[in-house]
Amino acid sequence: MRLSVLGASGRIGRLVVECAERFGVPVTGAVSSDGAVSLLFNNADAIIDFSAPEATVEMLKLALHRRSMVPIVIGTTGLGKVHEELITSCAGYAPIFHSPNMSVVVAILNELVGDVAKALGPDEFDVEILEAHHKLKKDAPSGTALMLGHSVASARDQIFQDVAQFDRVKEATELRKHGEIGFAVIRGGSIVGMHDVSFNGEFERLSLRHEALDAGIFATGAVKIARWIVDNHLPPGRYTMNDYVHHILNTR
Ligand SMILES: NC(=O)c1ccc[n+]([C@@H]2O[C@H](COP(=O)([O-])OP(=O)(O)OC[C@H]3O[C@@H](n4cnc5c(N)ncnc54)[C@H](OP(=O)(O)O)[C@@H]3O)[C@@H](O)[C@H]2O)c1
């Protein structure tokens, strides 16, 4: 497998390049904000993207324009509707994998959170999601926190937009609403990443927490996912962490 990296000079992009070298995977294209996105598509069997939403848009537009069949693994967060639509269109030609978190352990946490939310329901347990990251992270709450919130809402048959509470300060004169999912954010220092989903009842509290201790897990996860897609010749389509986790469980 030959790899191209978008965001190659960034914190995670650099780790992707290092990881590829360790795995003996040649990096044939390394693009940052001063490079041409078109270079990503030359001689690569897969593209890994840890950049910024504007760079991801440019890459996806180009992929669509070229009807590119090169698989893309997207780790960039803070994506919106336009990215969603482009990902779906590009997935008509190539496998497109997207996850705000490339850790298999976080994928398992996400499943657990859904199971617990379903079991406890919205009436007796108030869900609060706390996340912490380093001071250079731009988007908030993190893509992972949003993913966890979506899992809670869908397990409780709620519409996420109706129950997500991002600003308690603004709502300071009101009590917590029934069924709400609260988000809180910490930014500081070099925190790699922490997510805590708590279920707060009258007399007891359950907290499910993941802490990333080394950002290498995201880079290694992305390279392994690219290798899974390429080695298994996966057909065009949208892929998520669930697909990858099921592959891992099936091959155990
Ligand atoms: N999915 C996951 O598991 C996971 C884990 C961690 C982080 N992330 C996400 O991955 C992304 C990158 O994180 P990071 O910490 O590595 O950020 P970072 O250190 O700021 O790096 C961003 C990279 O993107 C490049 N870039 C920015 N704008 C660009 C543009 N318009 N065109 C081309 N390249 C551009 C930067 O190039 P320059 O250096 O030239 O500016 C740099 O190489 C963020 O969205 C972050 O939230 C995802």
Image: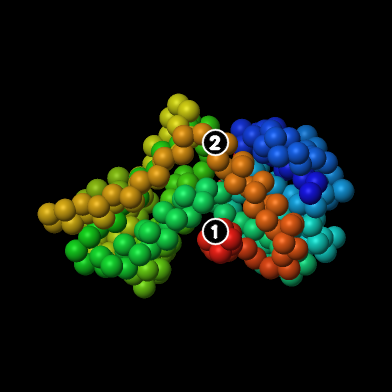
- Residue depicted at x 80% and y 40%: 26
Does residue 77 appear left or right of residue 43 in this picture? left
| Label 1: element kind | loop
| Label 2: element kind | loop
* On-image quarter of the C terminus: bottom right
- Mark 1 sits near ligand 1, with its Cβ under 8 Å away: no
Mark 1 lies on residue: 252
Q: Which mark is residue 148?
A: none
**Residue 192 picture location, percent across and down:** 48, 35
Structural crowding at the residue carrying mark 2, measured as other residues with C-alpha within 10 Å and reported as few (<14), some (14–19) or many (≥20): some
**Residue 244 picture location, percent across and down:** 58, 59
Residue in the foreground of this view, choosing between 181 and 204: 204
Q: How far apart are marks 2 and 1 (CA)?
A: 25 Å
**Residue 194 picture location, percent across and down:** 41, 40
Q: In this view, does 110 lie above or below 26?
A: below
State the residue lying farthest toward the bottom.
Answer: 157
Mark 2 lies on residue: 215
Query: Does residue 81 appear in the picture of this structure?
Result: no
- Residue depicted at x 68% and y 56%: 228
Q: In which quarter of the image is residue 15?
A: top right
Question: How many numbered marks have been drawn onto this rendered protein structure?
Answer: 2
What's the amino acid at mark 2? Ala
Does residue 250 appear left or right of residue 49 in this picture? left
- Mark 2 sits near ligand 1, with its Cβ under 8 Å away: yes
What's the amino acid at mark 1? Arg
Q: Which of marks 2 and 1 is in front?
A: 1
Query: Does residue 117 appear in the picture of this structure?
Result: yes
